[in-house]
Image: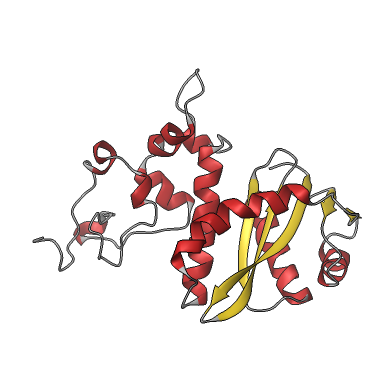
Amino acid sequence: MGAKWRVDETYCRLNGKWAYCYRAIDEHGQVGDVLFSERRNAGAACRFFERAIDGSHVEPARVTTDRAGAYPAALRQLLPAAEHRCSNYLNNGIERDHQHLKQRLRPMRGFKRLHAADTVTRGHALVQTLRNGFSSLSAGGAAPAPPRRRVAGAAPRDLGHYGGFRPPAAAGGEQRTCHHQHCPTYPHFRATEPPDVLAPLLPCQCRFTSR
């Protein structure tokens, strides 16, 4: 993650109301982190910067935002030494990057739960990071792989631990990952994995085992 961030929020539907998805990219286009919030204020901006800094282990030297009043207060509190820029057209990069997320969310017609919205939007950022080759999980070899191969080349268990997903422990402490679509342990990245990647997954002990 670079030290020059572009930060912005985009509108998403939550229980029939508008909510806000805070996102950040660096100068190379890598998505730093995502925070889904029902509020658009300084508190939400502070939570987003805290999560992004903790996740990337990088404190930005320059932050580019729009003219929303929540950002100056958050930056004064968390990043007083960072340069804050909010001129016209400087944030076009993050505005364009929002469209990748909106394209995925449009058929879903909104979310019902805040936790689910936060999980899906962060999972989308992880897949986008893999597709663009910014993660070590998608490093396949000397020759650069196509975007789809980068996602498929990341092991399912590595993706789960990278994204904070922890499958429930089976008997003896063994970690298992369910591959049944309706099981609560079903990973969100199922649709991006080819059959040969899913084959080695250990069977779960859920009620869908017989199907």
Name the residue rendered at 62%, 65% in the picture: 35
In the figure, is residue 185 to the left or right of 45? left
State the colouring used for the structure image: secondary structure
Where, quadrant-wise, is the N terminus in this rendering?
A: top right
Name the residue rendered at 47%, 28% in the picture: 146
Residue 43 coordinates in the image, percent (x, y) = 74, 76
Extreme residue toward the top, this view: 142
Residue 98 coordinates in the image, percent (x, y) = 64, 55
In the figure, is residue 87 to the left or right of 182? right
Query: Relative to 161, does residue 134 appear above or below in the rendering?
Result: above
**Which one is nearer the viewer's eye here, 71 or 101?**
101
**Which one is nearer the viewer's eye here, 195 or 52?**
195
In the figure, is residue 129 to the left or right of 59? left
Name the residue rendered at 25%, 57% in the picture: 178
Residue 85 coordinates in the image, percent (x, y) = 90, 54
Residue 158 coordinates in the image, percent (x, y) = 41, 44
Extreme residue toward the bottom, this view: 16
In the figure, is residue 145 to the left or right of 185? right
Query: Relative to 124, does residue 205 appear above or below in the rendering?
Result: below
Extreme residue toward the left, this view: 210
Where, quadrant-wise, is the C terminus in this rendering?
A: bottom left
Q: Place residue 188 in its image quadrant.
A: bottom left
How many discs mark residues in the rendered view? 0
